[in-house]
Amino acid sequence: MCYTIPALVENIKNKSATISYFGERKTAVCELTNIACGDYVYAQGGYIIEKLPPDEAKKILITWEDLFFQLQELDATRAALGSADISSDDILQGILERARQGVIPSQSEAVKLLNLESVASRGLVRKTANYLRQQYHKNSCCVHGILEISNYCVRNCAYCGICASSNVTRYRMSFTEIINAAGEAIDKFGFKSLVLQSGQECGYTIRELAEIVAAIKARFPVLIFVSFGEVGVEGLRQLYQAGARGLLLRFETSNAVLYEKLHPGYNLDSRLEHLKAAYAMGYLIATGGLVGLPGQTEEDLVNDILLTSSLHAEMFSFGPFLPHPASCLAKYPKPLEQDVLGVLALARLMCAEKTKILITTAYETLSSLAREHGLMAGGNSIMINVTPLKYRALYNIYPHRAHENETVALQIRQALAELKALGRGPTDLGS
């Protein structure tokens, strides 16, 4: 899944191609050597990943055409703002009107939006965020698979259930298991984008991780994100050379003092330098923060959004603080769902045009309605867990994770039903 719609290559120069489907035109990076004008391709995250036979592509396009425009119409209707969508708070109304015109809220305005007490006011912010999402991104929703290959980790993050000092049962998938699981996700279930995730220093060397990435890329057409913690600049280079094109690495908080409390022995500067080095190499960046951390302020959350934007993030990943009950932060409460939604909506208002905003598994664990609520608050990306069931519960960063015991097939059926009900299409050609 992403059941990406085939696109026609209209123009190609060097490694830049113009591709189109149903009147939509995008620019995509083409690293494949067998692509020419007139070819049909699949693209993910702004990268062409596969060439399709013309007959197959045209058949898929015929199947999609009516549904594509039906979904777009439904999404546009649901995202529209009406005459009743006006706040009696003149200051709030002014902020939202300017946001609709492309004016980014100031930091003080952003703090105000996070501090709203009225249910109606918070709802209007979310509705404005969804309106902006539809204006800039239409009904596109990217759907990634995530494969958790190991729960080994050398760090002792203060909230995490797989930290080095935890007594969780450890696992490390074998090379063959990883390739088979990736192949099933891509070939059987149609995923075009896959995140490989583990703890830091997860029991594989960088060379072994690069060999895993290279083996998947050699066998299957897919965009690969890596999420192995801080692997160092040379590690990033080796993984990129092997075929990885995305990095999922959250900085978690822009507050350096708070970061060091969460990550004993580590500092925020190191994490940020890692993200900056990855971007300079050409990685797509997926990053963000945690909502509801002990000691966190609304100013911190606004700074988290600003920092995410400054890191050139392709995808914003903001999820709730969910401390593991065996961790040293277990006594602290989880955030309210409205707090998570407030951050997602604010992220859309502050970074409307280019950003994909992920509905995280942590948020889905906090609320059974996370996908619907998050997608209607400006979100446009979801993940499906393709880790083999015998390992999935062992990736116990927090207990009772959403989809922990669900098959991939069931998750896909649920996701497609949710997306269809909202008028969203699982289509991602990148920005």
Image (spheres, helix red, strand yellow):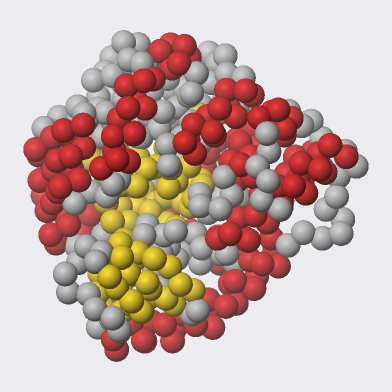
Q: Quadrant of residue 49?
A: bottom left
Q: In which quarter of the image is the C terminus?
A: bottom left
Most foreground residue, 384 or 39: 39
The image position of residue 79, as x and y in percent, is 69, 60
Q: Quadrant of the N terminus?
A: bottom left
| Residue 4 sits above or below residue 303 on the image | below
Residue 217 visible in rendering: yes
Tell whether 161 sits left or right of 345.
Answer: left
| Residue 264 sits above or below residue 113 on the image | above
The image position of residue 152, as x and y in percent, is 22, 27
Most foreground residue, 245 or 143: 245
| Residue 318 sits above or below residue 419 on the image | above
Residue 1 visible in rendering: no
The image position of residue 148, as x and y in percent, is 28, 41
Tell whether 180 sits left or right of 100.
Answer: left
Q: Residue furthest bottom?
A: 55
Most foreground residue, 104 or 334: 104
Which residue corresponds to the image point at 85% horizontal and 50% vertical from the top-left? Answer: 86
Which residue corresponds to the image point at 27% horizontal and 50% vertical from the top-left? Answer: 245
| Residue 165 sits above or below residue 386 on the image | above
The image position of residue 275, as x and y in percent, is 34, 33
Tell whether 240 sits left or right of 259.
Answer: left
The number of discs equals: 0
Q: Which residue lies furthest to the front in this view?
A: 13
Q: Residue furthest right?
A: 88
Which residue corresponds to the image point at 31% horizontal and 65% vertical from the top-left? Answer: 16
Q: In which quarter of the image is residue 174?
A: top left
Which residue corresponds to the image point at 45% horizontal and 27% vertical from the top-left? Answer: 252
